[in-house]
Image (cartoon, rainbow, N blue to C red):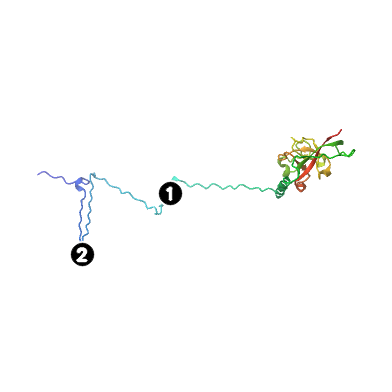
Amino acid sequence: MPRIPSPQPGSRETQPFALALAAVVVTGTTVVAVTLIWGVVAGLRGGDSIELMSIEDPTATPTAEQILSVETLAPSRPAPELVIPEVVLPDAALLVREQQLIEATEDQGPALGDSLPTPVIAPGAAPTFDGRPLRPVQTVRMLTTAYSPDARSCGKWADGITASGYSVWTNGMKLAAADTSLFPFGTIITVPGYNKGRPVPVLDRGGVIKGHRLDLLYPTHEVALEWGAQRLDVTIWEYAD
């Protein structure tokens, strides 16, 4: 008689088949509960296995290994340092001066640059400058401010030398800064209330001194601020000899 080989582990003959049937009687009423379990595993070779895919719970607490893995993939970086720029507020006195400038420009008098009647000088009463007689050429309405030779007014140019090359001590520190496109260096002017109304030269200029505006030199910043901003009738002079 030929020998029938016994089934080998993992062959089709060893695959499980199951069927279960159960009946339960509860309080006189027959309730048939049928549980059918049917498992078929086909074509598996010996040693094959099936891996179940696990579904992660999003609410579960990560393990130490998972945390380490995340930190390895995305290392933490220090937050950039917050740099807050320093805010430098202007000096209170400068704010007052700017307010005075605004108020002066809102004056209802003649507009800046308007020509006004030239003063009449009696014979022998003409002023002199540097020992030379003068005569009036023109009177113009101008906005006048004041400055000092220190850094608070002149900044990095506070070296004691005017833009024309003369010392700030020229004429006893009585001189003016002007827009030299209108009033060149050496122009002689008189400003009511400055240097007791005596003539002073234009020897300086400034970045904001444009148009019909003058900056009058004073020895200190505090005294310069006292001048404020004034609209005045400025007379331009020329040598009469």
| View extreme (right): residue | 124
- Figure check: 53 above or below 209: below
Count neighbours of disc 2 (C-alpha within 10 A) and say few if under 14, some if 14 to 19, many if 20 or more.
Answer: few
Q: Residue at x 43, y 47 (%)?
A: 70
Element at label 1: helix
Q: Residue at x 44, y 46 (%)?
A: 72
Q: CA distance from mark 1 to mark 2?
A: 59 Å
Q: Amino acid at mark 1?
A: Leu
**How many numbered tags mark residues here?**
2
Q: Earlier in the sequence, mark 1 or mark 2?
A: 2
Query: Of the numbered discs in the image, which one, if any, rests on residue 29?
Result: 2
Q: Residue at x 79, y 42 (%)?
A: 233
Query: Of the numbered discs in the image, which one, if any, rests on residue 68?
Result: 1
| View extreme (left): residue | 1
| Front-lying residue, 155 or 42 | 155
| Front-lying residue, 78 or 150 | 150
Which corner quadrant holds the C terminus? top right
| 1 or 2: mark nearer the eye | 2
Image position of 34 (left or right of 218)? left
Query: Of the numbered discs in the image, which one, if any, rests on residue 218?
Result: none
Which corner quadrant holds the N terminus? top left
Q: Quadrant of residue 117?
A: top right
Q: Can residue 147 be seen here?
A: no
Image position of 199 (left or right of 89)? right
The percent position of residue 78, horizontal first and vertical second, equals 52, 47
| Front-lying residue, 188 or 108 | 108
| Front-lying residue, 15 or 134 | 134
Q: Amino acid at mark 2?
A: Thr
